[in-house]
Image: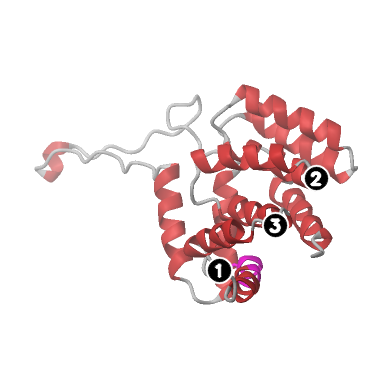
């Protein structure tokens, strides 16, 4: 039997680190009270129409750019930095209430109160059913409690909302491997590596499984 307790500890630690963030900082709304308006350039002075202000980069555009960099980055250390940026964007729920619930879930995990952590995560999902990170957090909690069916159901919800979620794919691979579904596990790890080629946990697991399966019938 393979030992996965270390992997579970790593996942739980990652959950603690990734969510130990208060509400994401917001850029000041240009229409908010007290915001300074952008200076205008008279059209007559430039003999041209005033240009529209630059449009802020959307969340999806930011993620697309980061994922493109992550896929091309061969240096594992630099790739980790890019992956951390992606995780920071994933954590941006856009709701102060959801952010607070996720923070409270993290605090509950830190004091080993899984029931409270699940309750806070459930509330976050009720408030924002499209927020992938709440499902991911709940999947991790279920996994560490050996509730694999529930965890895999939540991973499915994560991947519906963010198919590039390398953390969810790696966790899925670990669960499938524990259940003896090695070919499916290898597929999950391979999907994670297609997104994040230098992800060591997925590299090691995929290499081990590929070697074990090489002599077995398909």
Q: Residue furthest front?
A: 217
Instruction: Name the disc covering residue 50, or none.
Output: none
Badge nearest the viewer, 3 or 2: 3
| Magenta segment main secondary structure | helix
Residue behind mark 2: 146
Range of residues picked out in magenta = 198-205
Q: Secondary structure at mark 1?
A: loop
Q: Nearer the viewer, residue 79 or 25?
A: 79
Examine the structure image and report whether residue 141 is included in the region drawn in magenta.
no
| Label 2 environment density (alpha carbons within 10 Å; few <14, some 14–19, many ≥20) | few
- Badge 3 crowding class, 10 Å Cα cut-off, few under 14, some 14 to 19, many 20 or more, is few
Rendered position, 190 above or below 109: below
For the point 65% across and 42% down, which residue is it? 152
Q: Is residue 148 above or below residue 34?
A: below
Q: How many marks?
A: 3
Mark positioned earlier in the residue sequence (3 or 2): 2
Work out whether residue 81 or residue 2 is closer to the camera in this orientation and state it.
2
Is 97 or 6 nearer to us in this picture?
Answer: 6
Residue carrying label 3: 180
Instruction: Measure the C-alpha gap from mark 1 to mark 3.
Output: 15 Å
Q: Are circles 3 and 2 on residues that touch, CB within 8 Å?
A: no
Q: Is residue 28 above or below residue 66?
A: above
Asked if the residue at tag 3 contacts the one at tag 1, i.e. Cβ–Cβ closer than 8 Å, the answer is no
The quadrant in which the N terminus is found is bottom right
Looking at the rendered image, the disc whose residue lies closer to the viewer, 2 or 1, is 1
**Residue 217, which numbered label?**
1
Horizontally, residue 47 falls left or right of residue 109, namely: left
In terms of image quadrants, where is residue 113? top right
Real-space CA distance between mark 3 and mark 2, rounded to the nearest whole angstrom: 15 Å
Q: Secondary structure at mark 2?
A: loop
């Amino acid at each position: 039997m393979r030992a996965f307790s270390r992997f579970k500890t790593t996942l739980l630690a990652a959950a603690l680190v990734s969510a130990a963030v208060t509400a994401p900082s917001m850029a000041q709304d240009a229409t908010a009270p007290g915001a300074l308006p952008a200076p205008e350039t008279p059209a007559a002075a430039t003999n041209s129409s005033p240009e529209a202000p630059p449009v802020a980069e959307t969340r999806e555009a930011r993620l697309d750019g980061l994922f493109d960099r992550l896929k091309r980055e061969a240096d594992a250390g630099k790739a980790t930095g890019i992956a951390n940026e992606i995780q920071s964007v994933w954590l941006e729920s856009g709701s102060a209430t959801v952010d607070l619930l996720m923070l409270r879930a993290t605090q509950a995990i830190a004091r080993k109160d899984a029931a409270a952590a699940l309750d806070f995560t459930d509330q976050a999902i009720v408030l924002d059913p499209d927020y992938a990170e709440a499902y991911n957090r709940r999947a991790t909690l279920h996994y560490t409690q050996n509730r694999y069916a529930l965890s895999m159901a939540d991973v499915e919800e994560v991947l519906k909302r963010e198919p590039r979620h390398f953390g969810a794919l790696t966790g899925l691979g670990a669960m499938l491997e524990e259940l003896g579904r090695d070919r499916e596990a290898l597929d999950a790890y391979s999907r994670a590596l297609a997104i994040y080629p230098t992800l060591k946990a997925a590299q090691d697991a995929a290499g081990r499984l590929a070697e074990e399966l090489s002599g077995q019938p398909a």
